[in-house]
Amino acid sequence: MCLAVPGQVMQLDGTSARVKFHGVERVVQMDLVPEVKLGDWVLVHAGYAIQCMDEEEARETLALLAQIEGEMEEQSRAEAKP
Amino acid sequence: MSQPDLRERAERCYDKIAALVSGPVSLMEVCGTHTMAISRFGIRARVPETLRLLSGPGCPVCVTPASQIDHLMAMAREPGVIVTTFGDMLRVPGSKSSLEQERTRGSDIRVVYSPHDAMEIARAAPDRIVVFMGVGFETTSPTIAATMIKALAAGIGNFCVYPAFKVVPPAMDALVASGETRIDGFICPGHVSTIIGSAAYEPIARDRKVPCVVTGFEALDVLEGVILLLEQRAAGKAEVQVQYRRAVSPEGNRTALDILSRTFTPCDAAWRGIGVIPGTGLEPREEFLSMDARRRVQVEMPKDAVDLPAGCGCGEVMRGLKVPTECAMFGTACTPSRPIGPCMVSTEGACAAWYRYGRG
């Protein structure tokens, strides 16, 4: 339930922003990170950014998430085999 | 970083853990995402038998009392009321039914991704009362507090929140103080700590002498967290350390904490299967009382709530007294498709994780 995913701020409009995750943009609220700037990386939970991250930290998290997704795909392919 | 690099790093971690464990050690996590990660990565199968990795009360929907779910369902049956909730809550049983079952009986119950979406539903339906189910730990409660502040400022008077929040550190402290379970170290929740900061665990380390390590959610994060806890133990230390530096600072997110304390004040809270723990709940401050669903929708809380059906071991599992397979109903009477207790319903519950991935 406390899952949070990094994304990059592409557009900023007051406390609302467009944040890009894996190429998909979503509207995210910025009330909890007033210091945020255009282009920043943020950690997003329940439609709100809860923390700013530097790019390297965000990419490290994304790389690990991609690894899990890869493993899960591998697993579901293995499970699908008769 | 390539996959072989990651695998090699993980192997080195397992070697280190094996070298550090010499007798019985129990480490507890209090975060549903850690519960899932430990099971999914099969970590229990790779560490020495005497190292017990326990799941504490880390799943917010699992610890929401049946009485509050019953109350919310009673509200949903009132004319003109829309109940909004995170999807996790939908299948969690109250005493007799769940939100999902109530929805099929005609109540207007909608799943939202964000409390902000619930506020937008209220804005678009001014003739209805929109109740948002406020479940969650400190990761989530500030997002709901921020939404309440915005709704108040925008004059969206038909938006309200059912406060069922939980605060994590005093619950960890109460588990240690109860003396029921041996806890040699806490794997502290990653994103709760993003908000509250790692310093929030200092009293547990200092006064209770239990090492605390704030840990991330990937396999390597968890393994490194376990190593840090075992190293502290070997050195006879009890300190707070942060493994998950990518997202956690000692002081946390000050803005979020300010927003939280402007909106809510601490209260006692009942944890399903555990009981009342002082100071672990949040209720709206005076300025926000008009947004307390319990005032806004005048329906009495149904009496005689049944938190756990007879024979259900969720309470013992969440207190670290049992692992899921030690419950007589696990995997036989109680399965994810026919769940009896909340830990089997929620995907982040310990029983659901053990059922899906084995003991992990």
Image (cartoon, coloured by chain):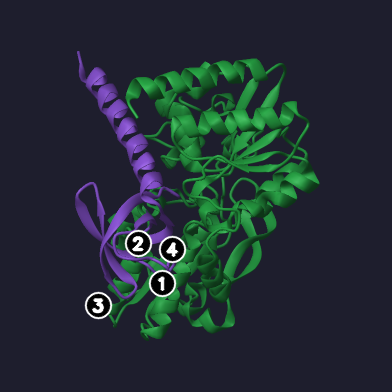
Residue B333 against residue B81 in the figure, above or below: above
The chain letter of the purple chain reads: A
Residue B351 showing in the rendered view: no
Residues at marks 4 and 3 on the same chain: yes
Which numbered circle lies on residue B133?
4
Q: CA distance from mark 2 to mark 4?
A: 11 Å
Residues at marks 1 and 3 on the same chain: yes
Q: Amino acid at mark 4?
A: Met
Neighbour class for label 2 at 10 Å: few (<14), some, many (≥20)? many
Residue B320 found in image quarter: top right
Chain hosting mark 2: B
Q: CA distance from mark 2 to mark 3?
A: 16 Å
Q: Which residue is mark 3?
A: B124
Q: Which residue is mark 1?
A: B147
The residue drawn where x is 41% and y is 47% is: A3
The answer to which of B271 and B203 lies nearer the viewer is B203
Asked which secondary structure carries label 4, the reply is strand
Asked which secondary structure carries label 1, the reply is helix
